[in-house]
Image (cartoon, rainbow, N blue to C red):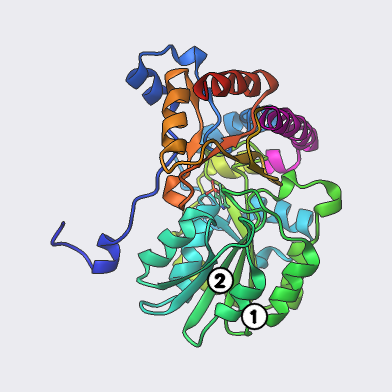
Amino acid sequence: MSRFGPDYVRAIAPYQAGKPIAEVAREFGLDEANIVKLASNENPFGIPESSRQAMAAAAAELGRYPDANGFELKAALSARYDVPADWITLGNGSNDILEIAAHAFVQKGEAVVYSQYSFAVYALATQGVGGRAIVVPAREHGHDLDAMAAAIDADTRLVYVANPNNPTGTFIPAPEVERFLQKVPANVIVVLDEAYNEYLAPEHQFESAQWVRKYPNLIVSRTFSKAYGLAGLRVGFAIAQPEVTDLMNRIRQPFNVNSLAQAAAIAALNDKAFLEQGARNNAEGYRQLVAAFDELGLEYVPSFGNFVLVKVGEDEQAGARVNLALLRQGVIVRPVGNYGLPQWLRISIGLPHENATFVAALKKALG
Ligand SMILES: *Cc1c(COP(=O)(O)O)cnc(C)c1O
């Protein structure tokens, strides 16, 4: 145990990222070309060609600092979401937004409410400021918003809600989210984390960005890492009223989103065809995976994201065991024992042949 730093920093369990392809190739003596990675909810089509071209053009100016204000990207987002540009905060990934919110609104000892089985970064952001976590038991692997509203105490400053949620894929319909927002005290900030929003079917989409007009304590968080295919560039953004946006702006690093990322994000935002192709592939891939789970008699959580949580055994080692058997066959998925789900694995939806490779390897792994 280190003698440095505060107790609450020493207590942090580091984030466990999906294994990189090169690392699995080295560890298991495999050819990188044959490895399938379905572990980090990345876009299986990779970066959009439009973003690649925008980055090539922006590369000439890399000797200069990025636009600290992100003028052009904010203008594009402002037009897309019909909110003023000074209601937008850019982040180095939406992970940055989640951290900025904790730093801007929570002091050591104050409380943050989030759900069991929700995104791991909520715990990290809370612990990073010495906050007290109030973890509310999940209901059917998803957020129990009534219980979360009831859990807000006098010391609570912030609530994180993931919709859809990662790693479980659960979704809360608009009327339920709005009922929750009406119940939350006006002095408590709600971060509505919609990292997978673009994957929702049209009937599930709602104008959360417009709710910000009604709720001065609401921050809507989005990312370019998932449906837009820019995970490696790190761009996300928040929409909130100016009072909240102004405070987040004081906390964020001045140059938190680099120039290539800003250029690529603008291009991706305007690339409707890329999003549509991704959504179509995702819907088909979801059907492909759950058909296999049904055939194998495996329980899964119905998902609204670009991944599925599946139960691969009854014992506490099932997830780790099946994960290892998959790795040996060159298939990388995400064990979720660190989320308290040791019998489950989270599978990101890939291209049809990647899903098929996974299914074949899973059948072998289960014997
Ligand atoms: C992936 C993810 C994010 C953040 O991703 P960034 O790459 O940092 O934008 C945020 N919330 C949830 C629920 C996620 O799954």
Query: As displayed, is residue 338 above or below residue 106?
Result: above
The residue at the far bottom in this view is 154
* Residue 92 left/right relative to 178: left
Percent x, y for residue 290? 70, 33
What is the quadrant of the N terminus in the image? bottom left
Picture quarter containing residue 11? Answer: bottom left
Query: Which sits earlier in the primary sequence, circle 2 or circle 1?
Result: 2
Percent x, y for residue 297? 66, 33
Percent x, y for residue 100? 48, 64
Tell me the residue that label 2 is attached to: 159
Instruction: Name the residue at 64% across, 48% down.
Output: 169
* Mark 1 close to ligand 1, CB under 8 Å: no
Residue type beneath disc 2: Val
The residue at the far right in this view is 203
Residue type beneath disc 1: Val
* Residue 286 left/right relative to 165: right
- The reply to whether the magenta stretch includes residue 67 is no
Instruction: Name the residue at 15% across, 57% down.
Output: 2
Query: As displayed, is residue 110 above or below residue 58?
Result: below
Q: Secondary structure at mark 2?
A: strand
> Would you call the spot at circle 2 few (<14 residues within 10 Å), some (14-19), or many (20 or more)?
many
Is residue 241 in view? no
Mark 2 vs 1: CB contact within 8 A: yes
Q: Secondary structure at mark 1?
A: loop
Question: In the rendered structure, which segment of residues is drawn in magenta?
Answer: 266-295
* Residue 164 left/right relative to 166: right
